[in-house]
Image (cartoon, rainbow, N blue to C red):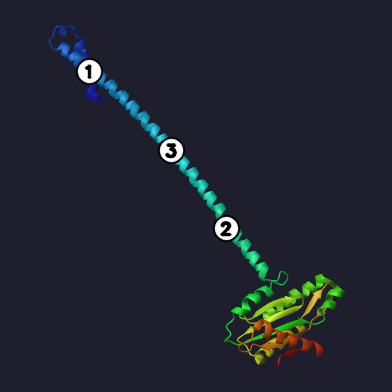
Amino acid sequence: MTREETELMAQIEALLNDPAHADSPLRPALARLHAFHRAEKQRLERLVTIADGYQRYVREDERKAQRRYQKSLHRQEKLSRISDGYQRLMHERNSALREASTHDLLTGLPNRRLIDERLPKLDERKRYTLVMLDIDHFKQINDRHGHEAGDQVLVSIAQTIRQELRDYDLCVRWGGEEFLLLLADTGLSEASTIVDRLRQRLAEQAVQVGDSRLSITASAGLSEYRDGEDLLNHTLLRADQALLQAKRSGRDRSCVAE
C-alpha cells in the first residue's frame, strides 16, 4: 500500500470513529466501502503470499532440475570418458596384437607373416631383388656365450640393417639368424653393392657381450625377380639356393642366383 492510500484509509477510519458523523447518511455506505476494501486487501495479500510461495516452489524446482541435469551431464561425460578410454585401449590392444602377429618380438623387424602378406601385393611390373642373409656360425655364439648373448647380437644386427637399408626397402627376420631383404626397384648389380656394404658394416662392428667383443660375418644369396614367376616359390627359392652356395664356398661372402 502506498503512502497516499495509507493516509486515505486513516482519514476514513477517523471519520467513521468520529461521533460527530454518527448520524450522517453517508456513514453506512462509507463503512461498507471500508470493510470491502479491507477484505479485498486481505484477499490480495493472500494471493500475493500464494504467488510468492509458488514462485519459490518453481525456483526450487528449477534448481533441483538444474542440479539433476548437471548431475546427468556429469554422468554422461564420465561415461563418455570411460567409453573413449575403452575404445583407445581396444585400439591399442588391437594394434599391439597386430604388431605382435606381424613383427618379431626380439628385433622389432617384420616377420614371415607380414612378408607373406606383402609379397603377393607387390607391383610385378617393377624390379625387385630378394636377399637371404645368414649370420655365420651363429650357433657357436649361443653355445659359447648363451642364448641371451645370441639375442643381444641379433638385436644389434637388426639395428645395423635398418641403418644401412633405404627407407623403401624391407627387412624381415626370416627365422633364427636368417634375414630376408626385399630391395625395391633394384637390380642385381645395385643390390650386390648394397649387400656387400651391409656385410662389411656388420663385420666392422663388434658386439660387446660381457667381457667379450664378438665379431660378426654374414653370408648372402641374391636373386632378382623375373617376369611371371612367383616371388615366394621361385625368386625366394633361388635366393635361398644362392645363400647355400655362399656358405659352401666358405661363408662371409655373397652369391648371385643364376
- Under mark 2, the amino acid is Gln
Viewer-side label of 2, 1: 2
Does 193 sit left or right of 22 as displayed?
A: right
Residue under pointer 2: 87
Q: Quadrant of the N terminus?
A: top left
Tell me how far mark 2 sits from mark 1, CA to CA.
Answer: 74 Å
Does 18 sit left or right of 199 as displayed?
A: left
Tell me how far mark 3 sits from mark 1, CA to CA.
Answer: 40 Å
* SS label for mark 1: helix
Which badge, 2 or 1, comes first in the chain's sequence?
Answer: 1
Name the spot of residue 121 as percent of width and height, x first: 59, 79
Residue 159: quadrant of the picture: bottom right
Which badge, 3 or 1, comes first in the chain's sequence?
Answer: 1
Q: Is residue 252 visible?
A: no
Residue under pointer 1: 36
* SS label for mark 3: helix
- Under mark 3, the amino acid is Arg
Mark 2: few/some/many CA within 10 Å (<14, 14-19, 20+): few
Name the spot of residue 4 as percent of width and height, x first: 22, 24
Viewer-side label of 2, 3: 2
Q: Quadrant of the C terminus?
A: bottom right
- Under mark 1, the amino acid is Phe
Q: Nearer the viewer, residue 204 or 100?
A: 100
